[in-house]
Image: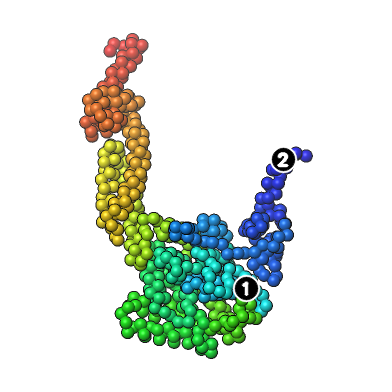
Amino acid sequence: MENRDPAYQRLEEDLLCPLCLRRPIRALTIPCGHTFCGTCIDPYRTSRNPQLYNCPKCRKETRARPIELVYTDESGKLWVDGSAVQTCFMDPELSDLPVCLIFAIGEKRWGKSFLMNYILRALSCQERGEPLSLGPDGEPLNGFEWKAGVDSVTKGIWIWNKPFVLEVMSGKMAVFVLDTEGSLDIQSSQEICIKLSALSMILSSYLIFNVNSFLKTTELDYLEMFLHVAKETGESFDLQCLQHLDILIRDWYDSKKCSQNYGNAYICHEIEKLSNSSAYASLLPILGGSSVTCSLLPHPGANLSQGMLSDMDENFRNHLQVYILSLVKGLDRYVKTDRHGRNVTCNQLGTILKKFVQILRNKEYRFGSQMQMHYSFKNYISLETCKQQFHNNLQLMKQKRHLKIFRKRPSKMKSSSGDLVKEQLADYERSLEGCDEEQKKELVKQMEASLKSEQETFCNEYAKQYRKYAIKVGAVAAGVPLAITGAALGAVFLPVAIGGALAAEAAVAAGVFGGTLTLGGFGTGVGAFLGKIFTRKKKSEQANQRGDTP
């Protein structure tokens, strides 16, 4: 029997599903670190909580949990957790699925996390094909961290690390639940508020704007700014933003008037009041559109310290159940789409998120207002457009016929592409908005470095191809290796004649394009002259061998 290294054997075992002892299919790694086939581990979900797993290998109980997707550092810069993006959006089993994201923004400590945790419970039922429910009466509320009080718990944007894969009429879709804090926190910097809210709107397909008691002027101001940003960012990334906005009024004064009809009546009343003022002219059409709804929830009661259903006032519990179950039942209508109505996949969304955060983090854009945000995205589009146009123009040069393109020496090609760099830089500088002269100068400098780097790569590659092609065409034109000899002699004599940087290029070109260029004619002539001498000598030798008289 073959003696196997114990360490190798342990490694091989670790790569197999511990249950079926095969390479995992639809691999699922649970938080304890062990990996199983998706179908093998599924029966080990605990019956009392489908978000928990009893690991059959180590016997540890593990749970799905919220993980930080986007966070701010001490200086206020925005960062995305790459491992969270990979886990949630880039999983091979999920990456091609249409995505739906339920998001909540609003003032801190008004029950966003509480609400999202009950949505998690309903989604668990939906995923398992069970009757929709908010869970057992006496079970404490778990999920996103929450507590009654005045201090904020959640920081940044958190995402439930396990999507709910639902069967809908069109197939499968992945539903994510996200929670945020700081999107409407007047004690935080305005810059952070704008950034988090812009992210929320660009990501969401169902956005809950959590409001206490009634819509206030401050909230309307923020909402107008957020909607403006959403429109601009949607255009930047070709996304349909604000697919659905639900203005959820919490602690509504009349617990008997909280149906959808009363919510619609309230928002219509607010629109009528705003129409008498010019202050929110851009907000009015959106509030009155089909993508915006208004819902009402009464006060939950005074004994809700653990979030249990049994501690809620009956009216609140009933309205909460109606609100959440109707939301979950209709999620197939809220798949994330782009501006052309095409579904956005998990993979695409993860890519957009990383790009978006990179823009927001850019130290050159320290914006604290809606217009600064607007200019930042406009300038980003200009930057990407400039780079793409330059790249496309270089590619067009490559696509021309070889005989035509290689008549241009490398030094000439470098000069031509240099002119193109200048043209693109001038266009880019003219397109920049909202920058002072110092900022504009720095942005143009960065763009110039980027374009020149691509130009250098292109010209180096062109020079290599030019030399190879020159030798190839020279050999074909002469019909014998003497053409190369002609080129070689051109390389010997021509540098003396022309000197400088063009000598090497001219030497390579010599003997290639017969009569087309002066230097080419010279090289070809040298090759032809030597060819005649060697041919005449060869014929003479053959005649002498036959005894003929030449």
Residue at x-position 57% and y-position 71%: 146
The image shows residue 527 at horizontal and vertical percentages of 28, 24
Q: Which of marks 2 and 1 is nearer the N terminus?
A: 2
The image shows residue 546 at horizontal and vertical percentages of 35, 12
Q: How crowded is mark 1: few (under 14 residues within 10 Å), some or many (20 or more)?
A: some
Q: Is mark 1 on a helix, strand or loop?
A: loop
Q: In this view, does 459 lie above or below 294?
A: above
Q: Residues within 10 Å of mark 2 (few under 14, many from 20)?
A: few
* Frontmost residue, 481 versus 21: 21
* Frontmost residue, 154 versus 494: 154
Q: Which residue is farthest right?
A: 1
In the picture of the structure, the residue carrying the numbered disc 1 is 141
The image shows residue 330 at horizontal and vertical percentages of 53, 76
The image shows residue 14 at horizontal and vertical percentages of 68, 50
In the picture of the structure, the residue carrying the numbered disc 2 is 5
Q: Nearer the observer, disc 2 or disc 1?
A: 1
Q: In which quarter of the image is residue 236?
A: bottom left
Would residue 296 appear left or right of 519 to someone viewing this image? Answer: right
Residue at x-position 44% and y-position 85%: 266
Q: Can residue 339 be seen in this view?
A: no
* Frontmost residue, 342 versus 297: 297
Q: Quadrant of the N terminus?
A: top right
Q: Is residue 200 above or below residue 461?
A: below
Q: In which quarter of the image is residue 166?
A: bottom right
Q: In which quarter of the image is the C terminus?
A: top left
Residue at x-position 50% and y-position 68%: 181
Q: In this view, does 103 lie above or below 543?
A: below
Amino acid type, mark 1: Leu
Residue at x-position 70% and y-position 43%: 7
Amino acid type, mark 2: Asp
